[in-house]
Image: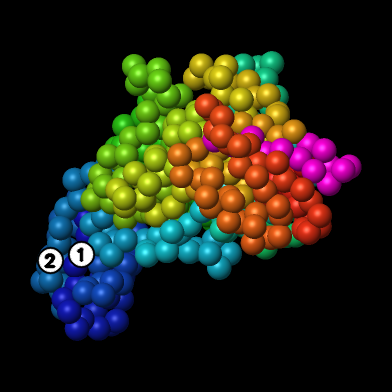
Amino acid sequence: MIIVMKHGSTQENVDKIVEVLKAHGLGANLSTGAQATIIGVLGDKSRLADANLELMDGVEKCVPIMHSYKLASREMCPDGRVAEVGGQRIGGKQLVLMAGPCAVESEEQILEAAQGVKAAGATFLRGGAYKPRTSPYAFQGMEDEGFKLLRKAADATGLKVVSEVISHDQIDTAAKYCDMFQVGARNMQNFRLLREIGRSKVPVLLKRGIASTIEEWLDAAEYIMSEGNYNVVLCERGIRTFETATRNTLDVSAVPVVKERSSLPIIIDPSHAAGKSRYIESLSLAGIAAGADGLMVEVHNGLPDYRSASGAEGRHERRGPAAHHSGIPGVGQKGWRSGRRRGKGTALLSGRWGWPRLWNAFQADGCPVKRETFSTGWAFPVENKAAPGFPGKWFPGE
């Protein structure tokens, strides 16, 4: 239940209601909006049968909340919540970009990725130190060493760290290195983990379970918030359907539904939904158009070869630095043949809209280029005479 205060009610009115709630063994959550102050009643409202709250000074009305989630509901905070993560705000009118590799693999790899995503406009560095995989034989992450490398790369680039915590006994260690915890899809209903993360008060990115309903997802958020941690951000990362053309199916409709039912910010992860880099731009635009508060994008220093990706983890063949690190939309890299010792190289690129932007960018840096058209894209033989930073600027890691 929520208690809506009249416009112009005093702090004394609010304090008296909170005292009554506490006297009945109930908690109170205050939300002060532009139009009114709302007091959320936490606990068994049947205890208030004799309280006559609607007759108290300053009370406009009492409204029951029919959802199983209370704190996460839109009724509890009609103006919507904004998550605060070390000075960064998620929600409101500002879009946020989180980007980085799926897993931390080395110091060089994560530092190059951090520099690339920073240049592309990201404010958060994502990366997995612990990786719960479908197969027990797959790479499980660098564990605590991965957290340390994430922190080092983030500090060097001015980014915030978001990384997954998979067990409640990792929380204290992870809190030393992470600005924001991620709860992955597989752990969305790990209720002990959710409660412990709630008690930690560290901001949380809660991914939707692979086959979870929106109500189950919001109930999971409620577990965290019920422990006093209201800095929760939801992440739609695709759900499992009968479709096999993409790794998962991005539920774009979840964005407006969450905005209607919940006060929590929501971002989308187009990478895990698609499993194919060529769909990332379209899904990102769709999510933002639907009202998402930001994006979480997976990027790699080397180009993943998605020809063999069948929906599971997919095998990645590293074939050189990825062109999307350049921050030029519409460009996807087919490969890179390097002649760095001679100061030359050939970037093999594809995309419908990207080549003029790449051309202009190279020319602006004083890099002579020549476009050659192929059936699969374009080739840019580039000489590195006038730009000492090339190819590192456009193709980090080469």
What distance separates the C-alpha of mark 2 from that of mark 1? 6 Å
- Give the amino acid type for the residue marked by disc 2 in the picture: Lys
User: What x and y, as percent, mark residue 175?
Assistant: 66, 52
Q: Residue at x 32, y 61 (%)?
A: 80
Quarter holding the C terminus is: top right
User: What x and y, as percent, mark residue 358?
Assistant: 58, 50
Q: Residue at x 61, y 25 (%)?
A: 305
Does residue 313 sit above or below 190 in this rendering?
above
Task: Tell whether 104 sits left or right of 245.
Answer: right
Q: Secondary structure at mark 1?
A: strand
Residue 344 visible within the image: yes
Residue labelled with disc 1 = 3
Report the predominant secondary structure element of the magenta stretch.
Answer: strand
Residue toward you, 57 or 98: 98
Labelled pair 2, 1 in contact (Cβ < 8 Å): yes
The magenta segment: 338-350
Residue labelled with disc 2 = 61
